[in-house]
Amino acid sequence: MSLRNLLLSGVYCELNKKYDVFLITTLNDRDFCQSLAPESTIFIYPPVNKIKGYIRSIFKKIDYFYFWIIHKPKTIEKYILKLKEDSKITYLLSSFVVKFWKRVIENSKLRKGILFFYLESNYTSLLVLNDIELVFIPTIDVQEDIILSNCANNIGIPLIALVHSWDNLPSRGSILFSPDLLLVWNYIMRDQAIEFHGIDSDTIKVVGIPQYDFYKKNIQISTRHVFFKKNNLIEYDKVITYTCVAKHVFPDEEKFIFNLYNLVHQGTFGNCLLIIRLHPTERTEYYEIILKNKNDIYVDIPDSLFAATYSDIHDIKGVENFVNLLYHSDIIINLASTITIDAAVFDTPVINIGYNIELPDSSWNSAEKWYHSTHFRNIIKTGGTALVFSEQELIITIKKYLENPKLHQQERNRIVEEQCYKIDGKTTQRIVKSIEETNILNQKNRSGLKRGKTKKTT
């Protein structure tokens, strides 16, 4: 995801024009990294101490529970309820341990003791020996990034962090390092950083969503005829796309898909094609098999650029296909997915599923509960998406949008304004400008380390 957000968006290229860039990565494909960042020095993240790693995993679980107890973000609540259902003993024990963690987090000396476990000597050496003058991390919750950040904090190297997704601040627990500058997509995220993490508003910059720069500058929107031809499809009058989600989000998704397929295949919506865009990592082979050779349906398989983890990707065809899919779909259907924002950017009507086929409403992960999440309820408030609670409502809403694609257009624009800040292709410039305006690179090195002749960032 960082590859898509930063390297492909142009952030790396802009930084490299002014600074010597060191790229530290978990990707083992060094040649591929070098092809994207040809002038960078590439490092693979050093291994971590296993004992410290085990302790950190315990801290993470405790902190997650603490974060919910203190702030009560709805995004976390579902998982806490699941813990309570699965094991009341674990739930009660966690409640007890949280009292200790609260003292640790709120006491500077105790907090410093905890942060010792987030320091690794080989990470510190990497920064010191290469005379790194600024650290720029693309996430707030990945172990390696947290360790690198704490090492930077510990030896006085300025630190900039980008929150890479809209649900991170209310759902990933405490930020266990101190950024000199925090970059966020929008003003909602800025307020969450202040409310949930106590970040000073003067150290937060709203910049927009980096990957949209790449979409705007590098992706060609084809005609609908070309879109069908590229995917070897017969041309249909209308296209309805359903985007799959993780199994724990929608356990009975398969049955929903078959019901939707039957409606399309029976001609409920006229001459219509149903596209099923699979989740990048879950149930892909299963769906490929069960949906194969069916009429009026096309299975779209995303590549690993859309996954949270890295496997293998060497071109941008997958992104190009995704953008054209959003543009040429008449309706996008999903269950509380970020795709809702993507669709709104292309002014494509969105329907959110708020019902299950078999799962009881009382279940911790019933469909309707996902829309109470701290981040997603802001989408619902705009009125820019239709939330349906039955198949009958789904049918009626699909027909309304097919008859009038402009329905809720102003509300979709509001989603874009609130979530994306600006879709102007200048997010990369704002990121680089934010670094320069804060004057971080001109601050005296707090550790007293000798500066090199050139500015360096990672």
Image (tube, grey):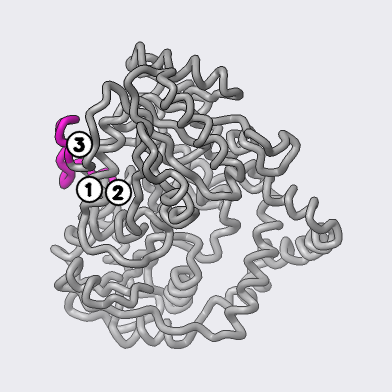
Q: Badge 1 is on which residue?
A: 214
Q: Badge 2 is on which residue?
A: 210
Lower position in the chain sequence, tag 3 or tag 2: 2
Within 10 Å of disc 2 (Cα), the crowding (few <14, some 14-19, many 20+) is many
Looking at the picture, does residue 138 appear above or below residue 71? below
Whole-angstrom CA distance, mark 1 to mark 3, is: 20 Å
Within 10 Å of disc 1 (Cα), the crowding (few <14, some 14-19, many 20+) is many
Within 10 Å of disc 3 (Cα), the crowding (few <14, some 14-19, many 20+) is some
Which residue is rendered at x = 47% and y = 35% of the image? 334
Q: Badge 3 is on which residue?
A: 227
Q: Secondary structure at mark 1?
A: helix
Residue 223 percent coordinates (x, y): 15, 31
Looking at the image, which is closer to me, 267 or 213?
Answer: 267
Residue flagged by tag 3: what amino acid is it?
Phe
Of discs 3 and 2, which sits in the foreground? 3
Q: Are marks 1 and 2 in contact (CB under 8 Å)?
A: yes
Report the quarter where the N terminus lies. bottom left
What residue span does the magenta drawing correspond to? 210-229
Please tell me whether residue 213 belongs to the stretch shown in magenta: yes
Residue flagged by tag 2: what amino acid is it?
Pro
Q: Main secondary structure of the magenta part?
A: helix
